[in-house]
Image (cartoon, helix red, strand yellow):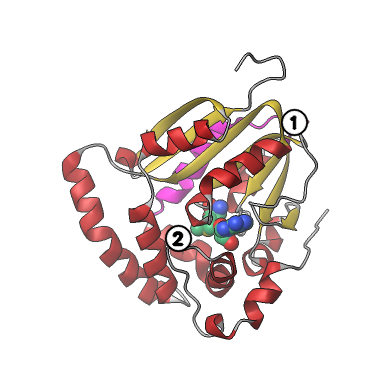
Amino acid sequence: MEVVAGGLNEVARAAPKVLAMPRANLDKDPHEVAAMFDGVARGYDRANSVMTFGFDRRWRTITSHVLDAKPGEKVLDLAAGTGVSTAEYARGGAWCLAADFSLGMLRNGRHRGVPMVAADALHLPFADESFDAATISFGIRNFVDTKAALVEIARVVKPGGRLVICEVSTPPFTPIRFLYRKFLLRVMTLFGRFSSSNPEAYSYLAESMLAWPDQRAFAQTIAEAGWHRVEWLNLTFGVVAIHRASKPPLNSEA
Ligand SMILES: C[S@@+](CC[C@H](N)C(=O)[O-])C[C@H]1O[C@@H](n2cnc3c(N)ncnc32)[C@H](O)[C@@H]1O
């Protein structure tokens, strides 16, 4: 089944300020973010692999293990882009839905054969308690309101259901953190220039990585949004971290 509805992107395309080489800013206007990802969609997966030196594949595999989606489960992969992670999660037999508000990204992943839907993370078009688990990889730092999105995701996940988020993070070891911060912006800008259709967008992506909270602060936000048992796993020196949490069961005290 493939369900791709129109919506935000039509509005974004009509806005004159984002027509040529759109890039978002750290205020993360949803129209600008969607238009920017539309603009990079074609070469996105390739550029991503180049910029991460191929590590992205390993991060997705580990995220898939942490998610542990089982046959019979319904999993929402939010900000799924081209569905590269969705396809990985679906391998185990779970029904995995790719949701994203960039139609360009979804279109470029049609060949993956996973169900897709156009949806904004802050206003999900799903009934309460529809999914056994929700997951986001490298998407949440682009949301205009992180906590509101985490509350909205909790609404559509069943009591006791899981949340797994893979996102860039802060290396805890000072020398690595120093090098990472010093070179990230330059390296991404350079790679973006040579391997992407919209180099400006890669400057935004690097800026949003540097501005993203560290592991502990993000865990705190997840807990404040009502999720329980928040924990995280550092990958590749903490350049990336996977946060895992669960929605309190119905009979929970807290
Ligand atoms: C860096 S890409 C990551 C794509 C994919 N998850 C991956 O791992 O390659 C970020 C994605 O988040 C999507 N996105 C950002 N904000 C969103 C929102 N509020 N609702 C839905 N999708 C959003 C963008 O359209 C983009 O496809």
- Give me the residue at 53% from left, 55% from top: 143
- The kind of residue tagged 1 is Pro
- Residue 72 is one of the magenta-drawn residues: yes
Return the residue nearer the eye: 49 or 172: 172
Q: Looking at the image, which is closer to me, 83 or 242? A: 242
Which residue type carries mark 2? Asn
Residue 8: image quadrant is bottom right
| Quadrant of the rendering where the C terminus is positioned | top right
Looking at the image, is mark 1 or mark 2 earlier in the sequence?
Answer: 2
- Where disc 2 sits, the SS reads helix
170 above or below 245?
below
Q: Is mark 2 within 8 Å of ligand 1?
A: yes
Q: Which residues are magenta?
A: 54-74
Q: Position of residue 247 (x, y in %)?
A: 63, 27
Q: Residue at x 74, y 32 (%)?
A: 73
Report the disc number at residue 48: 2
- Check residue 71 in the rendering and tell me which mark sits there, or answer none: 1
